[in-house]
Image (cartoon, rainbow, N blue to C red):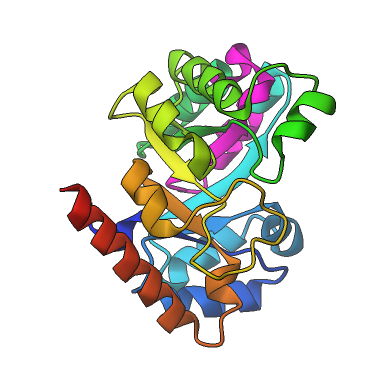
């Protein structure tokens, strides 16, 4: 995998025009684009085809499905028809929900003769702190142990990987092995504003610890020159990959 392939640009914007502009500008500087709930609810599911036509060859639909297994499966059957590369559920929905989602993606893709999207599970939102995990979600596990437990459950239920903060990368890799995908948000270049993220790390640090893909939004799309910002991150990732090898 080339360093550029590891970069997923988060299209966290509220209109199709800006999203399409970003794809046309950055399609040669990042490896994929993340489409989240803000953009889909603003522009409709037709945005997937428009982004693909604009040059987004790989789309990660950050759907974060969290529902009963039957409803999650129905959502995944619809998602599989959009030709996305990757999508996700909330691991907190449980193993039966994850299994239902995985089965629905596979069955629908076989029906249409397409490659099934990779299925990830969100382990713990990167905006949550250890205190919030304990006092609001009432878990006595540390964030690392909680994330590892969610990752193991996801792997056993048929998911191909997880979304986890940089702080849990090494623990997930040790628990789930080299082929289990780790997609990492909460990545911020040195000096960048962490905004509402809590468990952050630089791109080079995240790659060094074993992340497969990095999701980066505001440090690129809010930059004065998004292309330059993306290239700086790509070079940092490339250096980290070279050091690992």
**Is 212 positioned to the left or the right of 34 in the image?**
left
**Residue toward you, 64 or 141:** 141
**Could you say where residue 146 lies in the image, as x and y percent from the top left?**
60, 22
What residue range appears in magenta? 73-98
**Could you say where residue 51 lies in the image, as x and y percent from the top left?**
51, 66
**Residue toward you, 22 or 44:** 22
In magenta stretch: residue 61: no
Q: Is residue 64 depicted above or below 35 in this figure?
A: above
What's the residue at 56%, 21% (across, down)?
145
Considering every residue shown, the one lying at the far left of the view is 245
**Could you say where residue 184 lies in the image, as x and y percent from the top left?**
48, 46
What's the residue at 21%, 48% (across, down)?
244
**Could you say where residue 54 lies in the image, as x and y percent from the top left?**
46, 73
**Is 70 positioned to the left or the right of 2 in the image?**
right
Q: Is residue 145 depicted above or below 237 in this figure?
A: above
**Residue toward you, 221 or 62:** 221
Q: Is residue 220 depicted above or below 141 in this figure?
A: below
Considering every residue shown, the one lying at the far bottom of the view is 224
Q: Is residue 66 depicted above or below 61 in this figure?
A: above
Q: Quick check: can you spot residue 195?
A: yes
Q: Quick check: can you spot residue 27?
A: no
**Residue toward you, 203 or 215:** 203
Kindly indicate the quadrant of the structure image that contains residue 191: bottom right
**Is 134 positioned to the left or the right of 86 in the image?**
right
What's the residue at 56%, 26% (across, down)?
147
Kindly indicate the quadrant of the structure image that contains residue 232: bottom left
């Amino acid at each position: 995998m080339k360093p550029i392939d590891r970069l997923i640009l988060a299209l966290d914007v509220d209109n199709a025009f800006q999203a399409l502009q970003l794809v046309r500008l950055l399609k040669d500087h990042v490896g994929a684009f993340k489409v989240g709930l803000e953009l889909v609810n603003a522009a409709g599911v037709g945005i997937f085809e428009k982004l693909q036509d604009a040059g987004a060859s790989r789309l990660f639909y950050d759907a974060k499905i969290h529902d009963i297994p039957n409803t999650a499966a129905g959502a995944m059957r619809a998602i599989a028809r959009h030709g996305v590369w990757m999508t996700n559920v909330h691991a907190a929905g449980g193993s039966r929900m994850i299994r239902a989602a995985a089965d629905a993606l596979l069955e629908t893709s076989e029906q249409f003769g397409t490659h099934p999207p990779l299925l990830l599970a969100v382990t713990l939102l990167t905006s949550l702190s250890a205190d919030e995990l304990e006092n609001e979600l009432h878990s006595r596990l540390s964030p690392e142990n909680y994330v590892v437990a969610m990752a193991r459950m996801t792997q056993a239920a048929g998911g191909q990987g997880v979304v986890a903060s940089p702080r849990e990368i090494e623990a997930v890799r040790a628990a789930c092995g080299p082929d289990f995908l780790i997609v990492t948000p909460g990545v911020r270049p040195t000096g960048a504003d962490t905004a509402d993220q809590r468990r952050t790390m630089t791109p080079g640090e995240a790659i060094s610890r074993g992340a497969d893909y990095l999701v980066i939004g505001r440090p690129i799309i809010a930059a004065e020159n998004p292309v330059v910002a993306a290239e700086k991150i790509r070079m940092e990732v490339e250096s980290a990959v070279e050091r690992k090898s």
